[in-house]
Image (tube, helix red, strand yellow):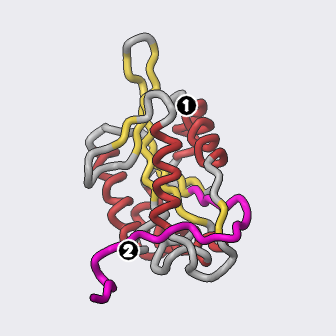
Amino acid sequence: MKFYGGSREKVCRLGLAHIFLELQEILIGTEVRVLDAKQANGAGHVRQLIDEAFASRPEWVPARSGDIDWVKRFRYNQTIVSRIGVEIQVSGRSDLLARDIVHIRNNLQDSHIDVGVIVVPSDEFEYRLTDRVANYSYAIRYVEQELREAQTYPIILVAVEHDGYSDEALPKKVTNRGKHP
């Protein structure tokens, strides 16, 4: 886990610690077992498992397409005090990390969230997922070297790990590409 732009302080100061702990519970509680082989496991299936875990928790709101993936609001009485937004980047191309940072930046600037979290697979976990998925080292390098202004945003990078091994690979998404008649 790596904190940028005063995100650790904001989580504490704005009363988001409970929600941040709940986010960690969701990620840790999502059991993912993979086949121990390079690029053998479908990253889309991991994303589906994480999304199902968020959906099972109260008050986590999924976003519309093209926006932050999940948002939860901290309320005091009937007033929204602060919000945390989560981008799940465990499937898709690694260059989509830039889009996630833009989503977070725009939502911060529009006051829709106060802190953004980007979830990526650990380096070891990414090795076992379908190719071109961002991993934790790539995300850090991207924020600190490629898109350096992202370090000024209250962003938290969180790496997730698999829970162990299975005799079967996680299913990969089936697309029309690559099908032979």
132 vs 47: above or below: below
| Residue depicted at 57% across the width and 65% down the height | 121
Please state which of the two labelled residues, at mark 2 or mark 1, is closer to the viewer: 2
Q: Which residues are magenta?
A: 158-181
Tell me the SS state at disc 2. Answer: loop
Percent position of residue 60, x then y = 44, 34
Percent position of residue 151, x then y = 47, 60
Kindly report the distance in space between the C-alpha atoms of the residues bearing marks 2 and 1: 32 Å
- The numbered dot on residue 13 is 1
User: Nearest the camera: 83 or 171?
Assistant: 171
Q: In the rendered image, is residue 144 in sight? A: no
**Residue sticking out furthest to the top:** 77
Residue topped by disc 2: 95
Residue 176 in the magenta stretch? The answer is yes
Q: Amino acid at mark 2?
A: Asp
| Residue depicted at 45% across the width and 79% down the height | 132
Residue 137 falls in image quadrant: bottom right
Asked whether, in this view, residue 9 is left or right of residue 167, the answer is left
User: Nearest the camera: 156 or 170?
Assistant: 170
Percent position of residue 52, x then y = 48, 45
- The numbered dot on residue 145 is none
Asked whether, in this view, residue 62 is left or right of residue 156, the answer is left
Q: Earlier in the sequence, mark 2 or mark 1?
A: 1
Asked whether, in this view, residue 26 is left or right of residue 43, the answer is right
User: Nearest the camera: 67 or 36?
Assistant: 36
